Amino acid sequence: MRKSFCTVLVFLACMANAMAEHKSSDRIREFSKLPNWSGIWVQAVWPLEVSGRVAGGEAKLREGLQLIRQPPYNAEWLAKYQAGLADTAAIAAKNATFTACTRGFPALMESPWMFQVIVLPEETLILFENGQVRHIYTDGRRHPSGDDLWPVRLGDSIGRWEGDALRIETVARDSTEPLAPRAWVSMLSDQAYFTERLRLIDADTLEDQMTIEDPVAFAGPWHMNLKYARQKVVNRLLEYNCIENDRNPVVDGKMIIRSP
Amino acid sequence: MAIKICRSILIAAAALLCALSATAHHSGAMFEDQKSMVLAGTVKSFQWSNPHCWIQLLVAGQQGTIEWSVEMGSPSQLFKGGWRPSTLKYGDSIVVTIHPMRDGTNGGLYMSASRQDGKAIAETAAN
């Protein structure tokens, strides 16, 4: 009796092991079909110098940034946008004092921070040097529904592979935050949804074809094309802890340099 | 009339924005973008830290020795430019060019630097 019980146990253990190996080989096969986006990347409009600034200054930077351009608002939202622009004192105050240690989506995709892309069969992760992570689930799931979904800064992203391109859909972005630093009066509604097509267009360039649609605020879709350059000197994601030694507090509405 | 008002709003907004130095972590409005200042002094300390590295520079002048705070990029930006935590040491004599603070305090944004003998402090990397 005991012998046959042991035989059954050994048989079940062997079966479980065989099934696990089978699943593991399936996963390896899936993994081998995925593109290799390893390396360190940074948004192409942010070639930061030792000073921490962009060569050519603000004017040069603004030429390249796409999220600070005027969104394709409908008449109602355009009026709100223009009223916001008219408040130059508020914009000047914001410009003079802003600090950005993290960003919401989609601003994060146009941020100055280096990142790595980790491509797995179940999800793709975009890891930024400031510690923010985008999770793009590619396991076939849908966005959560009902009470399981609420607005967050990076929204909820799912994706699927179309050849070597990752098609990403993002919803549930926190609509209380402006679109990006410098775009202080550009707002989206809570119905905004985002489609991205991320792919390698040459050995050293990742491209994100992004479309923003907003049935409440926009008259039509907003297309943009973001590019990321492979970093060849920095070969690891260096820690960027924004509060380690922040010596730029705002005092009486002005940013200052604090003594060490 | 409405077009005129819109145009002047846009011009005013553009002027406000273009007056700023484009830094990654915070507003660059506190720096005089159009001015540069050369400081020759000795390094009191070199802070290799986030979100910015800093050179504390002792500059001798008629009023005595004054300490200047020179703001730089983050360690990853300096690393890319060939800098390392050991690049500057206490007592090093260097010449630093900065965009000074608008409020007249003893600080500014790093533009370039060299040793007192004119040699480059770090090799600049391409990417």
Image (cartoon, rainbow, N blue to C red):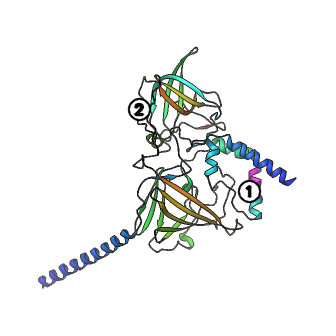
**Chain under label 2?**
B
Could you give the CA–CA distance between mark 1 and mark 2, rounded to whole angstroms?
Answer: 48 Å
The front one of A133 and A117 is: A117
Res A188 quadrant in image? bottom right
In the picture, the quarter occupied by the N terminus of chain A is bottom left
In the image, what residue occupies the spot 61% across and 41% down? Answer: A57
What label sits on residue A212 in the rendered view?
none
In the image, what residue occupies the spot 49% across and 53% down? Answer: A229
Total of numbered circles in the picture? 2
Q: Secondary structure at mark 1?
A: helix
Does residue B118 appear to the left or right of B103 in the view shown?
left
Does residue A114 appear to the left or right of B101 in the view shown?
left
- Magenta residue check for A82: yes
Q: Which residues are magenta?
A: A79-85
Residue identified by numbered label 1: A81
Residue identified by numbered label 2: B87
**Chain under label 1?**
A
Residue B77, percent from left and from top: 48, 42
Q: Amino acid at mark 2?
A: Thr
In the image, what residue occupies the spot 84% across and 50% down? Answer: B4
Q: Secondary structure at mark 2?
A: loop
Res A213 quadrant in image? bottom right
Does residue A214 appear to the left or right of B51 in the view shown?
right
Vertical position of residue A180 compared to residue A167: above or below: above
The answer to whether residue A149 is seen in the rendering is yes
Q: Main secondary structure of the magenta part?
A: helix
Residue A32, percent from left and from top: 36, 69
| Nearer mark to the viewer, of 1 and 2 | 2
Vertical position of residue B48 compared to residue A80: above or below: above
Residue A201, percent from left and from top: 49, 61
Q: Amino acid at mark 1?
A: Tyr
